[in-house]
Image (cartoon, helix red, strand yellow):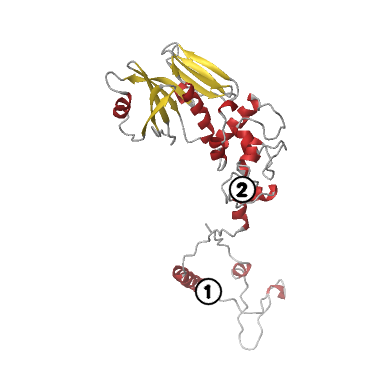
Amino acid sequence: MDVINNKKSDADKSGLDFVVMPKFEGTKPATPPADGPANLVSRPAPQRGKKTIAIIAGIFTIAVLAAAGYYIYMRIQANLPNVQPKLSIDDPATLARADTDDDGLSNEREDIAGTDFQKADSDGDGIADGDEVDIFGSDPMLFDTDSDSYDDGQEVARGYSPVLNSTDRADSAERQKWLQKSVDLGLHEPTITTLRTKADAAAASNKTLYVNKAYNYSVEYPQELVLREENNGQTVGLYIAGSAPDEEITADPFVITLAGQAEAQNLKDWVTAVYERYQAVEELNINGASAVRLRSMTADEYGCSNDGIFFRKGNSVIAITWNCSDSAALDQYYTGIVNSFKFR
């Protein structure tokens, strides 16, 4: 808010303090005051009324002109086209932040690494440039980072380190690091396809056999995962080693638990009836036992889709659930657990 100071000028104040000249009588000059001519004013007194009116008129005129100018300005602005600045894809800053080839590396980082920002796998080894840099530590410009005659994609898929020339597979600590980073950052194509198509079942690190006494089944899980039980084995959860588990065991990446009682129905009919909202029902045969798979079983409050595979023994139906099944990094671990499931 503008503050206006109403302050009289020195000129206005001087108009209140003057000496009236003595009246002339004929041609004889008036007698000067006793204290001498210094107090005589030789000019006429100012006319205050006219000056005040002139000032007010000037202020009013300025205000009118300002208002008129503002009105004209606003009319002009209203008639101008509403042009909003747009980011151009050719803008250097925009291009630097973008990830044109969706490989996990921004264009700016690709420029630093020397990779092609229009090609997800610059060296053609089956691993996306971003995954090589951020997850596996290999060189995105070298087809075979450790020069052992095996491309980086094949080594990672089969459990070998792409940066260490060794006949031994990567230890559990390195694989655990890969897994955690893959979940945190997400995998990119062609890495996802490479891990799925080039994987070797024997490439998994040492596995632990778990036997469930509550429902008499067994599964195998790799060292990159930790298994925990609840209610004497009625619920089993598996989470990534080295990460902090959720307070709720049912929020672990993988959960094995009793889904219900099938009674006289066959397994597919029971699953279809219980989960009638979901149409993606697939019948499987795993280790000689019938199984039913539901893909994207549910979508929770966080937008995660779940995958479930159901086994039956007698009337009891056991479900293996993969929470947030959109994470491609966990696909091979889920598949390994499911394929190892057996009733004893």
Q: Which residue is tagged 2?
A: 106
Q: In which quarter of the image is the C terminus?
A: top left
Say whether disc 1 or disc 2 marks the residue closer to the N-terminus.
1
Residue 192, percent from left and from top: 54, 39
Q: How far apart are marks 1 and 2 (CA)?
A: 63 Å
Q: Neighbour class for label 2 at 10 Å: few (<14), some, many (≥20)?
A: some
The image shows residue 203, relative to residue 65, as above or below, that is above
- Residue drawn at 61 percent across, 83 percent down: 24
The image shows residue 280, relative to residue 235, as above or below, that is below
Residue 138, percent from left and from top: 68, 38
Amino acid on which the number 1 mark rests in the picture: Gly
Quarter of the figure with residue 32: bottom right
Residue 288, percent from left and from top: 42, 21
Q: Which of 19 and 152 is in front in this view?
A: 152
Q: Nearer the viewer, residue 201 or 17?
A: 201
Amino acid on which the number 2 mark rests in the picture: Ser
* Residue that extends furthest to the bottom in the rendered view of this protein: 27
Q: Is residue 81 visible?
A: yes
Q: Which residue is tagged 1?
A: 58
**Any mark on residue 133, and which?**
none
Q: Which secondary structure, mark 2?
A: loop
